[in-house]
Image (spheres, coloured by chain):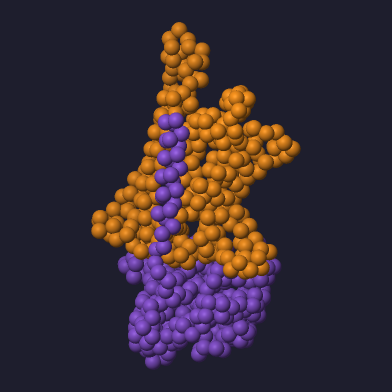
Amino acid sequence: MKKSFIVLAFILAFLAYSGLGAAPVSAAEIEITNVSYDPTRELYEEFNAAFQKYWKNKTGDDVTIVQSHGGSGKQARSVIEGNEADVLTLALAYDIDEVEQAGLVAKGWQARLPKNSSPYTSTIVFLVRKGNPKNLKDWGDLAREGVGIITPNPKTSGGARWNYLAAWAWADKQYNHDEKAIIEFITKVFNNVLVLDAGARGSTNTFVQNGQGDVLLAWENEAYLSIAERPGEFEIVTPPTSILAEPPVTVVDEVVEKRGTRELATEYLNYLYSDEGQRIAGKHYYRPSNPEILKEFGQYYDLSTQLITIDDPLFGGWATAQKYHFSDGAIFDKIYTK
Amino acid sequence: MAKSRTQAPSKHGRRGYRQENPYLRRLLIILSLLFTILMLVLPLVIVIYQAFGTGWDRFWAAVTNTFTLKALYLTILTGSFAVIFNTLFGLTAAWALTRYSFRGQGILITLIDLPFAISPIIAGLIFILTYGRLGWAKPILDEFNLKIVFATPGLVLATIFVTLPFVARELIPVLTARGTDEEQAAVLMGAGFFRVFFKVTLPHIRWALIYSVILCTARAMGEFGAVSVVSGHLRGKTNTLPLHIEILYNEHHYNEAFAVSAILVVTSIVILTARSVVEYLSRREGDDVR
């Protein structure tokens, strides 16, 4: 009798314990989900707070913004699989194109907002250890023997695809469009890669926290953030040519229709283009797309760098570049399996 | 435990082993001690040290942060569901496998063990492929307006999957060893199924049951892999404690990440203590669970 009582007490305790957990944490609020890529965590933390205030002033409603961060390609995948994002703020247009092809985003999404739907831009720079001991100045130096490179995997990370294409753009000029020589150069660069993480933030941790490698190929904003986190340990080298990375944003039509959040989600994205939104982007080391506000942050950026865009004939837009370089069996696969 | 004590006592008692090779004995003890310290104790101490590295205030702020509390709540919720489900499943499966004999019994025993052998990422992906937006069950889910993956039910399913074998695996040997004599006697005396179960079977297996529930809880609280795949990483919504720790770490909030890790470390220590207490109590009653 006594023994079964103990067992009963145990079961009851467990039920009480789980019942306790079932109590609701918060009342219903208007809520939108922003599925974003890796390095935008700090940016959206601050931007969301600003937008909440703005929305409260405008409508009197409280809005909650749920954030999700990860490698851009991986995030796009999760939205296709059913992770319900009201807005997508990814690293490159191709990842949103994939979501469009899955039927979640309307065709022609990139024309819905100004500047190719990219409220802020960035570029790819080198983050090197203090004093630049390996003397890395330009893309050509990355192919040197004994240089340890950290970059995420172009298959899963948007930033990594920009890294690869920036190196390609340099080599195209250097070797006068000789594709064989370009591929040889890119192969050398990737042979120097020590760790290929899935996302940009993973690579930053590998380089900054775990001390691996001589150079991190990084988003400009991510590089500045590392310097702010660990002052005096690193330097940024902005190569003379690089790529203009345009991380685009969009409303996910299927989700906002279902949830009735289109107005709020659209306003959220528009606010990224407002002066306040632009300044927050600038503060987090993204290049504001508004040229006036970009000037305010001129001291950070080497504005003399020659930036080539993805729509340059060399790449012919994301759809072409993706197919040519990154799809299965394309150039990157050949290089990396060599 | 009990067995080794009864094994061939030599003239010098247990000394006989020592005389064989005192150096080997010392070497093995030192090696295992060293390994435990380097692999377990030292890292755990460092976690605790890092957690308090910037003072109690920052630790407390990290632990009582809204997102941490939501993650803790979610971890407790998913863990509770997983443990309750697996207790019921474990009892059912163990009973069926030891009290009845049927075709496919061997296959069922093997299948219960599958989650031990399969990589958690596969566990996560199966749920995505089944219940995701492109999954075959999607139309049915939409019919009832249900959301499984990238929501709490998905987290519960993934946790149940990885902890499935714990209870059944622990109970099967105990039930087999006990045999069915007492239960058959009870049935002959006219006891019904539930009476037999609660009066005869349960008292025998209760220590093993509690023991396995404790282990199952430990595993469920710490599950990372499968849960990571089905979570979608929605902060404050589908982030369990282990996922929250990863996010904090990735956001350069190292001290906060370790502060939250300390919650899990302390939980593990509590769970291990509970396990030892159960082992002690069960041994005292002669129902050694180990």
Which residue occupies the extreme front position in the image?
Answer: B190
Is A207 located above or below residue A13 in the figure? below
State which quadrant residue A60 falls in.
bottom left
Residue B41 visible from this viewpoint: yes
Residue at 70%, 37% in the rendered image: B105
Residue at 54%, 40% in the rendered image: B167
**Percent x, y of residue B95:** 61, 36
**Percent x, y of residue A160:** 54, 70
Chain B rendered in what hue?
orange
Q: Which chain is purple?
A: A
Q: Nearer the viewer, residue A261 or A17?
A: A17
**Percent x, y of residue A266:** 49, 84
Q: Nearer the viewer, residue A262 or B248?
A: A262
**Percent x, y of residue A219:** 46, 74
Q: Is residue A54 left or right of residue A108?
A: left
Residue at 52%, 68% in the rendered image: A71
State which quadrant residue A320 falls in.
bottom right
